[in-house]
Image: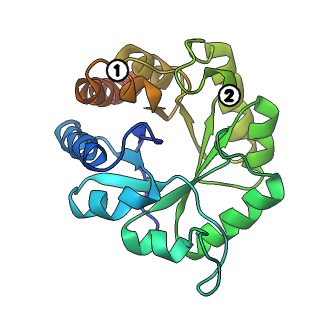
Amino acid sequence: MKRKIRTPYFEIGTKNYIWGDKVLEYAKAADAAAKKYDIDVLFITPATEIRRVKENTENLIIIAPYMDTLRPGRGMADILPEGLKDAGAEGVVINHCEKPMSLPQMKKTIERARELDFIVFACADTVDEAKAIAQLHPDIINPEPSELIGGTGNGVSSMGYVKEVIKSIKEIDPDILVEQAAGITNGKQVYDFIMAGSEAAGAASGIMNAKDPIAMIYEMIEATRKAADDLKKQEE
């Protein structure tokens, strides 16, 4: 059965900034921080690292960065969904700006992911693209303007964009979780986005390019915990 993600959660993407033992080092740090702050942490890592991360952590929700839609059999070099699941993945990213998909391809991938009870983590660029993807009902949409991704130094999404895109997605499907991740480089930004209505925050280059990546992992997950606590106080 697909795992239910507690909100607010935090997401870490390694992309290909690191590999091998360094991935495991960061994964163990994220695992310890997830336990310490009692926060669900999604860890998106290359397919080659999924099994080792799974076997050496207890608290992470491991997400594959991509999959193909083939079935067992022929398909040299394609990424088999069943292989990802058996390695320990609990979900998959679709339509990242560095691996874009057409809407028909997204639809086919989401349908295939559902066969395996995978969490579907969909990326979007514009508000209009987010609305189109919401019609396919993924579990998560991460709306992030592509010009802010990858440590470009162009800042983070504006609060106007954040609020507009959350409203647009929730009007279509209130069950979709909405995350903000583009351009985030510190814990304060994590806190601010969650307090503005985002159900999660995440970072890739903001962690991987930090002076002390492990310290930044702790800082951002701690900020997620603080936002969770402050949101709870607001409700009481």
Q: Residue at x 40, y 39 (%)?
A: 12
How many marks do you count on the picture?
A: 2
Say whether disc 1 or disc 2 marks the residue closer to the N-terminus. Answer: 2
Give coordinates of residue 140: x percent, y percent.
58, 47
Where is 48 relative to 164, above or below?
below
Q: Residues within 10 Å of mark 1 (few under 14, many from 20)?
A: some
Q: Is residue 24 above or below residue 29?
A: below
Q: Residue furthest bottom?
A: 73
Q: Residue 217 location, x and y as percent?
A: 29, 30
Tell me if I can see residue 145 in this picture. no
Q: Percent position (x, y) of residue 18?
A: 37, 40
State the separation of the CA atoms marked 1 and 2: 20 Å
* Numbered mark located on residue 210 in the image: 1
Q: From the image, which quarter does the C terminus lie in? A: top left
At 67% from the left edge and 15% from the top edge, which residue is drawn? Answer: 160
Give the residue at x 29% y 17%.
211
The amino acid sitting under disc 2 is Ser
Q: Residues within 10 Å of mark 2 (few under 14, many from 20)?
A: some
Q: Which residue is mark 2?
A: 146
Q: Is residue 113 left or right of residue 42?
A: right
Q: Which SS class for mark 1? A: loop
Query: Which amino acid type is shown beneath numbered disc 1?
Result: Ala
If the image is split into quadrants, where does the N terminus sit? bottom left
The kind of secondary structure element at disc 2 is: helix
